[in-house]
Image: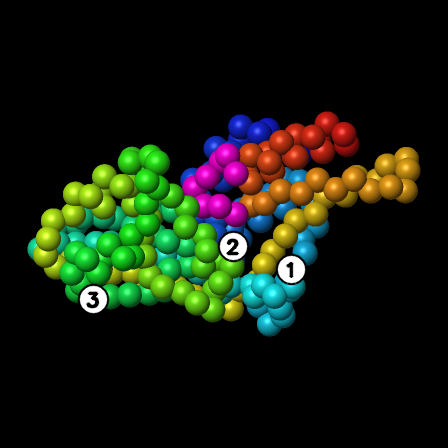
Amino acid sequence: MSLTMEELLRELTPLNRVICSSDYDYTIEYLKERLPVRELAYTAADEYNGWVIPPKWDVVESKILKDGRLVYDGTWHPMATMALSAPFRGRVTRDELRKHLHYDHRYPGAVPFHFRQLFRSWKRDWGFCVPRTLYDALEDGYYDVVIETREEPGTLRMLEWELPGAVEDAIVFGTNLDHPGVANDGLSGVAVGVALFQELA
């Protein structure tokens, strides 16, 4: 079956494709149904070059409120809740809340991708990724924070597409499926790779 770059990007870009998540699993199944790929799977029980596969992680509920009013919805974008955020429920001061908010100082309206915990899943904190404008506009006082997540042991799933050639040498094209809600890092490489392999096939 043929899969265009536009179709792939339109369907998969909006998903919360954090490594080991339900949306990542959906992405794997989506590609397996449409392409002649084989799956490789690695369990969380093993360590790979010092890296531990993180748990499967999904956001159930995520928000910041002040006086009962919603200040920030951590589900409005896949990057709005920090990747692999620890669950948290409680009331905090503005100063404490700001310690858990991540922003990009270069782009006041942008939401950054905070990915460090995906590589250090044994050392996790709770948090949100927000525009700098929201960080600056927070009023003094107390904020109610809710981050509810669903977790289970993770399995890292990968796909491989092999095209045999006329020579024994192998040329490897690699890209990644993760980076939630982003097309221009990883997923665009997948789209180009799929188009390339469909043409070569």
Q: Residue 43: tell me if it is visible.
A: no
The color scheme shown is rainbow
Indicate the secondary structure of the residue bearing disc 2: loop
Instruction: Measure the C-alpha gap from mark 1 to mark 3.
Output: 37 Å
Q: Nearer the viewer, residue 181 or 122?
A: 122
Residue 177: x percent and y percent?
Answer: 56, 45
Q: Is residue 169 left or right of residue 89?
A: right
| Residue 181 lies in the magenta-colored region | yes
Crowding at label 2, few (<14), some or many (≥20) Cα neighbours within 10 Å? many
In the displayed orientation, state which residue is furthest to the right.
167
Residue 90 circle label = 3
Three-letter amino acid code of the residue under disc 3 = Gly
Q: Is residue 160 left or right of residue 64?
A: right
Note whether 70 is above or below 86 in the view shown: above
Q: Residue at position x 56%, y 34% from top?
A: 188
Three-letter amino acid code of the residue under disc 2 = Ile
Residue 173 circle label = none
Range of the magenta residues? 178-185
Crowding at label 3, few (<14), some or many (≥20) Cα neighbours within 10 Å? few
Q: Quadrant of the N terminus?
A: top right
Precedes in sequence: disc 1 or disc 2 = 2
Q: Nearer the viewer, residue 22 or 65?
A: 65
Residue 19 circle label = 2
Precedes in sequence: disc 2 or disc 3 = 2
